[in-house]
Image: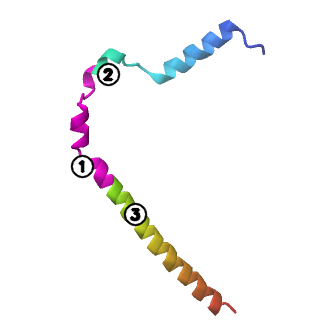
Amino acid sequence: MKLTSKLLKQIIEEEVVKFGDMESTEDRAKDAVELDADELGSDKAHELSIDFMKALKIEETRLLKRLQKINEIKKTWKL
């Protein structure tokens, strides 16, 4: 089967139908929240997420050390 421009257009149309109704960019722009740069800095969410990631990294390190100890004990008890 040769891929012609007509066949390609037909395939694209079939795929576009699968997407459903597309929203216009103007409609999406109305829903967007606009903030000034100084308002973005006052949000503590980024700081909290960074602190949370640091806490997760500490917990991961602790658990890895514990797992290493468990594996060492398993090796010594292995017959």
Callout 2 amino acid: Arg
Nearer-the-camera pick, 45 or 18: 45
Q: How many other residues sit within 10 Å of disc 1, few (<14), some (14-19) or many (≥20)? A: few
Q: Position of residue 1 (x, y in %)?
A: 78, 16
- Residue 29, placed above or below residue 60: above
Q: Sequence order check: which comes first, mark 3 or mark 1?
A: 1
Viewer-side label of 3, 1: 1
In the structure shown, which secondary structural element does the residue marked by tag 3 occupy? helix
Query: What is the span of residues highlighted in magenta in the rendered image?
Result: 30-49
Residue most extreme to the right: 1
Q: Where residue 68 sits: x, y (%)?
A: 55, 79
Label 1 to label 2, Cα distance in Å? 26 Å
In the rendered view, how is the structure colored? Answer: rainbow
Q: Return the residue at label 2.
A: 28
| Relative horizontal placement of residue 21, taking residue 43 as reference (left or right) | right
Dot 1 lies on which element?
loop
The dominant secondary structure in magenta is helix
Q: Are marks 3 and 2 in contact (CB under 8 Å)?
A: no
Q: Residues within 10 Å of mark 3 (few under 14, many from 20)?
A: few
Q: Quadrant of residue 4?
A: top right
The image shows residue 21 at horizontal and vertical percentages of: 40, 19
